[in-house]
Image (spheres, rainbow, N blue to C red):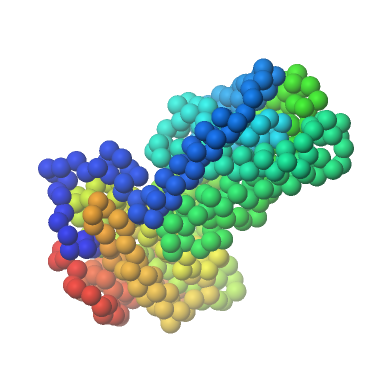
Amino acid sequence: MAAPSHTSVKSRDTVTTLADRWPILGQRRPLVVYLCGIVALDLIAIGFFAASTDFHWHDLLTFVALMVCGAVCIEATRRLGMPAGVSRDLLSAWWLPAALLLPPVYALLAPIPLQLLLQKRVRETVVYRRVFSSAAISLAGCAASVLFHAVVGDLDGLTAGAGGPILVAVGCAVLFTVLNTALIAIAAHTAVPDTRWREVLWDRESLLLDVVELCLGVLVAIACGVNLALLVLALPPVVLLQRSLLHAQLQAAARTDPKTGLLNAAAWQREADTEIVRARRTGETLALLIVDIDHFKRVNDTYGHLVGDQVLIGVAATIRSQLRDYDVVGRFGGEEFVVLLPRADVTEARRVAERLRSRIGRMAVPADDNMVTVTISAGVAIMSMHGDDLIELLAAADLALYRAKELGRDRICLPATPVPPARRPGPEAAPS
């Protein structure tokens, strides 16, 4: 249930909260400070380098040509759409050349027009996320540009294909990728501290995509340095590769709940059926959990749906952080989550469920001057003990969940055996 930190609560029925008008104010205070700090640093860097740069027509023409290529890529893929969670767009193929070929101020400015175009033409999202993304890319590009020009100086070596400048360009592209990823990962971890670092940094797929973007950026920079007209030849392959990548991401997004990043109900059922078939064949144990947030409607009614969404995201991240890589977790709808635990017996399943209950109970989401906490109830079912297929296991776990709610919520139940909640220090939560 929602438990404010014993301060006054403004009713949603009478007052429109500031978090509705300015979503950033609904975030954790450390995250707000971090985001504002990065944006402020970016603005300072733009002012400093703009004041110290001599602008030339050739540089301006190169910058405009790169931005036009980026805009063409965005427009060429716009019809495919870009749902929440899809963020790889290969636009580094145009940001990196601006960093390598032009003074640092252009690297700072390059993300702004393309992020605006993404916001207006592809998918509108909360403004502070676009602004922060632009600032993170700008600062990473500026660092790469400063380093490249400090080491190489004359660009003739790069355009002539000399090994040294190309290696430096690759190193600066790596620096760009590392800094950009690090800045965004810090923000993601600050937003949900329970998230494991490896989940917000790299996995195998994202690392491969970063390598592809790095190679594209360096190749486009060399071609652009040789002759600006070669961008006409570089543009079609980049557009085709970007469309292929976006199509693959859209297929993955079709399996994913856009709000929490977990598997959606249909994808989870397919994965769960596969695991159950494997468990039958091998004779291994398997457990199924249904997790429900207690009194979630009260959170939405009191604090608004933006805060409710943050609670869902926080609960999903906490669940994911407490499970093994091969456990199958999904959002089953509303405030309900499902977890399949391969090779888990009764003892292991109860231990995992109790750990989830304890960790989620300690989670807090900021809302105005309050901190919202929630509890969960969970039903546990074991294969062969409570059912032999997915339908039977879901029915048994659902009955166990219903029993947990009847017994007062904030507890774990098997179909016939309640597990009482451990007492937590501090004042009692507000009654439901």
Q: x, y (%) of residue 19?
A: 28, 44
Near-viewer residue (424 or 386): 424
Query: Which residue is at 35% across, 54% downward?
Result: 28
Q: x, y (%) of residue 59?
A: 68, 23
Query: Which residue is at 43% across, 61% downward?
Result: 193
Is 103 rendered above or below residue 299?
above
- Left or right placement of residue 177 versus residue 357 in this view: right
Which residue is outermost to the left? Answer: 14
Near-viewer residue (405 or 325): 325
Q: x, y (%) of residue 414?
A: 33, 76
Quarter of the image where one finds residue 124: top left
Image quarter in which the C terminus is found: bottom left
Is 403 rendered above or below residue 154?
below
Query: Which residue is at 30% across, 55% downward?
Result: 366
Near-viewer residue (331 or 58): 58
Count of marks placed on residues: 0
- Left or right placement of residue 365 versus residue 203 in this view: left
Query: Which residue is at 31% across, 48% downward?
Result: 26
- Left or right placement of residue 66 versus residue 420 in this view: right
Q: Is residue 388 visible?
A: no
Q: x, y (%) of residue 328?
A: 50, 62
